C-alpha cells in the first residue's frame, strides 16, 4: 500500500484595490478600439488617417504601460515593463512610418486592403467581447473541481 501526500495549492492573496475590476481592462480596450477604428478608416479608403490613428493608439498604449501600475493595465502588461514599452513604441513608429511613406494605391488595392482591415477589426472586436465576457464570469466557476 502506497502512501501519497496530497498537497494543497496555495493561492496568492487577492489584493483589494479601490478601483473597480473593469478599470484594469480600460487601457487595453482603448488601445484595441483605437487600432480597430484605424482599421475601419483604412477600410473606407482613408489609409493615412487610419494608419495614423493606429500608430497613435499604439503609442498611447506604450505611454499607459510606462506610467500606470500593473494592477491597472490588465492584458496590456504581458512581459516586463521595458519590453512592453519598447515593443509598443517600435510598432507604433513602424505603422506611422508606413502610413507616411506608402504612396496612394489604386482602387483594387484599396478594396483588398479594406477587406483585410475589416476582417482584422472584426477579429479584434470578437476578442474584446470575449475578454469582457470572461472578466464578468465568476471566479468560482473558473476554479477546477477538486
Image (cartoon, helix red, strand yellow):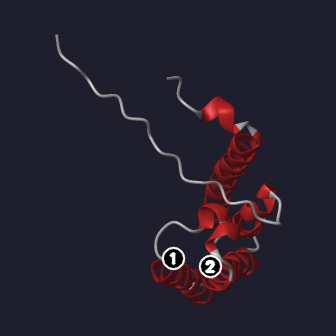
Q: Secondary structure at mark 1?
A: helix
Q: Which residue is mark 2?
A: 65
Residue located at (67% from left, 33% from top): 140
Label 1 environment density (alpha carbons within 10 Å; few <14, some 14–19, many ≥20): some
The crowd level at tag 2 (other Cα within 10 Å; few <14, some 14-19, many 20+) is many
Residue 8 screen position, x and y as percent: 43, 36
**Residue 139 to residue 131: above or below:** above
C-alpha span from label 2 to label 1: 7 Å
* Viewer-nearest residue: 8 or 118: 8
Instruction: Give the residue at x 68% y 80%.
Output: 68
- Indicate the position of residue 88 as horizontal and vertical percent values: 55, 79
In front here: 49 or 36? Answer: 36
Asked whether, in this view, residue 101 is left or right of residue 21, the answer is: left
Query: Mark 2 near mark 1, Cβ–Cβ under 8 Å?
Result: yes
Residue 40 vertical placement versus 65 (above, below)? above
Q: Residue 93: where, in percent of width, then height? A: 56, 87
**Residue 134 visible to an observer of this rendering:** yes
Where's the N terminus, which quadrant? top left
Residue located beneath label 1 in the image? 84
The picture places residue 31, in percent across and down from the top left corner, at 70, 69
Residue 40 can be seen in this image: no
Q: Residue furthest left?
A: 1
Q: What residue sits 73% from the left and 63% below the top?
A: 24
Above or below, 51 against 33 in this view is below
Amino acid at each position: 500500500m502506497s502512501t501519497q501526500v496530497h498537497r494543497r495549492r496555495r493561492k496568492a492573496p487577492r489584493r483589494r484595490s479601490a478601483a473597480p475590476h473593469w478599470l484594469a481592462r480600460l487601457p487595453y480596450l482603448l488601445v484595441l478600439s483605437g487600432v480597430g477604428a484605424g482599421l475601419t478608416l483604412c477600410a473606407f479608403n482613408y489609409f493615412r488617417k487610419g494608419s495614423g490613428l493606429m500608430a497613435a493608439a499604439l503609442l498611447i498604449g506604450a505611454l499607459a504601460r510606462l506610467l500606470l501600475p500593473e494592477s491597472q493595465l490588465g492584458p496590456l502588461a504581458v512581459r516586463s515593463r521595458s519590453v512592453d514599452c519598447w515593443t509598443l513604441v517600435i510598432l507604433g513608429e513602424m505603422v506611422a512610418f508606413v502610413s507616411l511613406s506608402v504612396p496612394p494605391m489604386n482602387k483594387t488595392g484599396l478594396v483588398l486592403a479594406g477587406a483585410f482591415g475589416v476582417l482584422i477589426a472584426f477579429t479584434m472586436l470578437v476578442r474584446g467581447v470575449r475578454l469582457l465576457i470572461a472578466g464578468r464570469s465568476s471566479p468560482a466557476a473558473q476554479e477546477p473541481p477538486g
